[in-house]
Image (cartoon, rainbow, N blue to C red):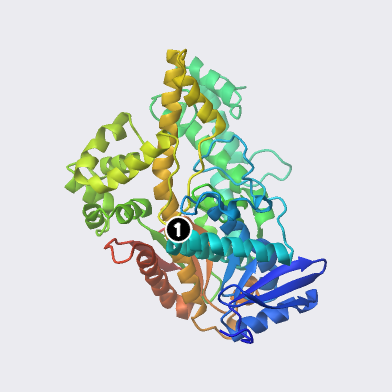
Amino acid sequence: MTRADPRPHWIVLGRDGDDTLWAALDSAGVTFSRERVRFADVGRRVREAELRGGVRWVWHDTPAWYPPLLHAGIRVERAHDLRLCHAILRDSAFVPPGHAVGASRAWDAEGADGTDAAPALFDLPTARGSLPSDLDEALAEFARQRDAIAAAKDSGRLRLLTAAESAGALVASELRAAGLPWDAAAHDRILSDMLGERPTHGGLPSAILAKAAEVRAALGDPTASLDSQPKLLRALHRVGVNVDSTSRWELRRHEHPVVAPLIEYKRMMRLLTANGWNWLSEWVHDDRFRPVYVPAGVVTGRWASSGGGALQIPRQLRAAVRADRGWKLVVADVAQLEPRVLAAMSRDTALADAARGADLYGAIAERGKLEGREKAKLALLGAMYGATSGESGRLVPQLRKTYPRAMKLVDDAARVGEDGGVVSTWLGRTSPPPSRSWQDVQSDASDSEASELDTNLARRVARDRGRFTRNFVVQGTAAEWALAWMAELRNRLSALPEVPEDRSATASGPVFARRAHLAFYLHDEVVVHAPAEHAEAAAQAISDSAVSAGRLLFGDFPVDFRLDVHISDSAEKV
């Protein structure tokens, strides 16, 4: 590529008031042109560059740049998200210690502020705050990130991870722009059928009131408070149901007339508060549900949702997810994703062989001489999440005999965590170090005057951290596979033909109204909204993308990522 090439490898965007500052870089990252682009001209210039091809956009934060382009009918093929990639490279054990990318603290606005919060697998993200958006700082940070990847001990993996993470940011914006087709009338009917008609003057629906009366009758207390956990526990204790919580798992251990109606009451209230009529009014407009996805919203790289609860749509409401007329929904989920990822990471051919069947847990039960599919599932999940007691703990030793490579990988990760170390996913996302309070507990236990209480506390928090790191490597790598799956699927769907304008799914917006597109994502599941005549091709694209993602991450290791794919007018499970 010469410096006069009209198709630069990178275009870095920055802001200066109402204008956009634009720098074109060659493939080596050398700047060969800079210019100021008027705000009104940005969309046109981006569209022209995309039509020429060969361009990769660099910007400080995808949610700040991409949604306005999508609104204008412009889809970009590739981008590099400086915020997301900074977080990966700053913390990755693959990057040499002390690298300049870790010192650029202005890019730590997503919450890496040195606080004492202990890491958790399912924490929601903190607020991002402000990030540098001027061109010079974006150029400087991009240079630091490129250098960090080049200096990394496994630069190929980190390069793939940053590309996948950035592609995921594009997908997240596109999912919100296109929305998930949603039938508000069907949702209303479901709520009415399950909860009773919507009250016109506030209060609770009739079916919930009736169920509450049933619970209170079983408690022998017509005034019992059912929505205050401490008061409800006291009422349960008075009738001999001695539980520490009102989780359905604990309640079901007791035989008492209050158990069944209480579980049902809690289920009904959960549906009302999380996805009831207020949720429907707030989040479903123009036949679309448009949640706010947060890529890398949890520490392992899994996505979160900061609005709408996209990652917690209850099974009962899936019947409200309905394709537009003349379109179909292609729903696909991966069977037992994390155990398959564990097989590939550990190169455990025995576990990979078990994963080739339709039911991995059934195969594990047969080969490991475990007592049925459910016991096998319990054992494997226990191994990945660090169960050391109960039924899971009892079964794990048998797994170690049958699948020694897989078990060694998670056992080693747990040992590192217990010792205060960090672990990394397959592509190089690295777990946070232990908190200051964790270190203080370990220090107190090693003191010559430490009590037995100090020692026991240190052991417990060490084991807790070992369970965290044990699962971090598997869950984080599964998230990486899913990113690669979606990125490949995004490209394959964009290559499918458009339908005529009179067949448009207009509510999906100008970019996606006439072509198959991703409409929903949930860890190991995707939903594609496709013209009916392209639904089979979209289903094939989903399957082919899963195979491609496996090869991209794990080469020719023979692990089978099995998909359950079906085409329907609704997302309701069949």
Residue 483: x %, y % from top left: 47, 61
| Res 456 → quadrant | top left
Going 62% across and 50% down the picture, which residue do you hit? 103
Question: What is the crowding at mark 1: few (fewer than 14 residues within 10 Å), some, or many (at least 20)?
Answer: many
**Residue 248 in view (yes/no):** yes
Which residue, given by chain and number where applicable, does mark 1 sit on?
480
Quarter of the picture holding the N terminus = bottom right
Q: Nearer the viewer, residue 31 or 127?
A: 31
| Res 368 → quadrant | top left
Q: Vertical placement of 462 versus 126: above or below?
A: above
Residue 561: x %, y % from top left: 33, 61
Question: Of all residues shown, which one is farthest toward the right?
Answer: 17
Q: Vertical placement of 103 versus 44: above or below?
A: above
Q: Nearer the viewer, residue 4 or 279?
A: 4
Seen in the image, is 25 located left or right of residue 427? right
Q: Vertical placement of 88 versus 146: above or below?
A: above
Going 26% across and 63% down the picture, which residue do you hit? 558
Callout 1 secondary element = helix
| Tally of numbered tags | 1
Residue 383: x %, y % from top left: 32, 40
Q: Vertical placement of 548 versus 385: above or below?
A: below
Q: Nearer the viewer, residue 511 or 574?
A: 511
**Residue 196 in view (yes/no):** no
Going 52% across and 39% down the picture, which residue do you hit? 119
Q: Nearer the viewer, residue 332 or 416?
A: 416
Quarter of the picture holding the C terminus = bottom left
Residue 443: x %, y % from top left: 49, 24
Residue type of the residue flagged with mark 1: Glu
